[in-house]
Image: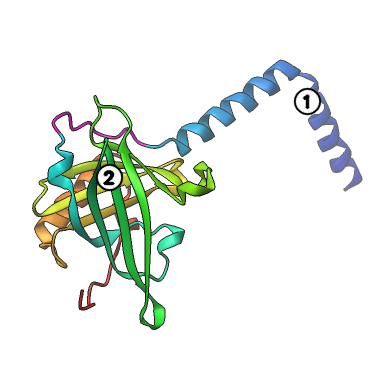
Amino acid sequence: MRLILLLALFAIFKYSQSISLSDILKDLRDKIEELKKSQACPESPLIPNFDLKAYLGKWYEIERITPIYEQGLKCVTAEYADKGNGIVSVKNSGVLPFNLPLSINGEARVKNASAPNFLTVQFFKDLNTDLFQGNYHVWKTDYTKYALVYTCKTKSTETAWILSRNKTLDSTTVAELKQFLNNRGVNSKKLTAVTQNCKN
């Protein structure tokens, strides 16, 4: 038994001698790059003729990849209104367990006029921190019936929403939007249905 252990240690020692420090560092760099790629967000599709004014108004969440701040929320809605100067007011509302209402206000703006469907949303602006700031990319919408929105800093924190102008959305449209997500590298199986059984 001791002989086998000694031979194993000798083999490990000899193998380690044949590998240079530069090889080890290169291997480490490669592993880090692989990890970065696995955490990279998918490229958002550009909608060059995106009409922000037509997008404004009230939307209901139908399904979502649930972010931590929406855990346990039902009857979630988002309302957008034009504040002028390229700023959009944001009001997100929902209902917590025990029917406790919750709402939060923020602002959104287009980051670049050449990518009008890529917005930045900011909450708690007075705190002067980007901790409550995120991207809001409209991936697909017909303005009157449905919208598909995606946000991502890293793959492990990605969020997606299937939105509707009404409390329901037909299964065909939902399936098409899920396929659109899948085609862009987002696993639609991570989506969960949002309960919309509140009066408002």
142 or 57, nearer to the observer: 57
From what the image shows, is residue 139 above or below residue 37?
below
The quadrant holding residue 75 is bottom left
Number of residues whose C-alpha sits closer than 10 Å to that of mark 2, classed few (under 14), some (14–19) or many (20 or more): many
Q: Which mark is residue 88?
A: 2
Q: What residue type is labelled 2?
A: Val
Residue for point 27% across, 45% down: 88
Task: Say which element carries label 2.
Answer: strand
Q: Residue at x 27, y 35 (%)?
A: 85
Q: Is residue 144 magenta?
A: no
SS state under label 1:
helix
Q: Residue at x 53, y 28 (%)?
A: 33
Please provide percent x and percent y for residue 100: 39, 78
Residue 16, disc: 1
- Residue 18: image x %, image y %? 76, 18
Query: In this rendering, is residue 98 above or below 133?
Result: below
Residue stretch rendered in magenta on the structure: 42-49
Residue nearest the viewer, comparing 56 with 134: 56
Residue at coordinates 24% horizontally, 33% vertically from top-left?
45
Q: What residue occupies the far bottom of the structure in this picture? A: 98
Picture coordinates of residue 39, whole percent (x, y):
47, 38
Q: Is residue 85 left or right of residue 105?
A: left
Q: Is residue 50 left or right of residue 71?
A: left
Q: Report the Cα–Cα distance between label 1 and label 2.
A: 60 Å
Residue at the front extreme of this rendering: 84
